[in-house]
Image: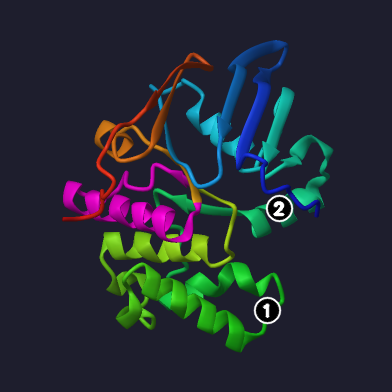
Amino acid sequence: MPVATRSAPAVQTVDVTKVYRVGHTGYPALRGINIKIERGEFVAIMGPSGSGKSTLLNLVGALDRPTSGRVIIDGVDLKKMDEDKLSLLRNRKLGFVYQSFNLIQRLTSVENVEMPLISRGIPERIRKARSLKMLSAVGLHGKSNKRPAELSGGEQQRVAIARALVTEPALIIADEPTGNLDSKTTSEVVDQFTQVNKGFGTTILIVTHNSEIATRTQRVISLKDGLVEKEEYIKRLDSYSTP
């Protein structure tokens, strides 16, 4: 896999379009998106249903390809990569956090966190130690042997964040990660993303409908009708973890 230069943005899209076709009819989801997310940024993407948020996330996550334009992740142009290389990039450079947690119910917390490391062929002792370290980092040191059913919704999402972190990705992509949580737990999970961003320097891209979550990030990119409607830098206190 190509090695990015340290000056490369974490994410860059250049005139990206995406058209879905049904028969002879084309439905444009993205109509020329240009964004740049620098390393270490914590950025929210917002917009109404149908604005193109999920489509953009799929392209940035190397889960789909644009109709035209370029998607560049950590200095690597995805257009030049075949499916095998894209799969490797997802495993090495990207971490994913979803609304539904996507934990394997029969596995313990530490076993769930280990999953991305197994495909790398990392020895069990090393991956177990790394996974326990990540669980400790998200405040779940004492719950490594608990299964998802034994955890609260917020704790399950923190396991998912630890799983995303364990590969030391260049970018974490979070798709409505608090959509199934109450307001108090939502605040706790956003605090966790904040601590990950500040403590590890990990770039985080979060899609959300929640404006309160967006104001906890550093920048908000608003989409409308497949275009960037506006970008807003958030002025906030330097310390924005839980009081």
The image's colouring method is rainbow
Horizontal and vertical percent position of residue 136: 38, 75
Residue receiving disc 1: 122
* Gap between marks 1 and 2 measured at Cα: 17 Å
In front here: 165 or 176? Answer: 165
Q: Which residue lies furthest to the top in this view?
A: 25
The structure residue drawn at horizontal position 38% and vertical position 83%, both measured from the top left corner, is 145
- Above or below, comparing residue 22 to residue 83 in the picture: above
- Residue range (magenta): 174-202
Horizontal and vertical percent position of residue 162: 45, 65
Q: Can residue 34 be seen by looking at this rendering?
A: yes
Q: Classify residue 158 by image quadrant.
A: bottom left
**Secondary structure category for the residue under label 2:** helix
Residue receiving disc 2: 89
Check residue 198 for magenta coloring.
Answer: yes
The structure residue drawn at horizontal position 69% and vertical position 70%, both measured from the top left corner, is 119
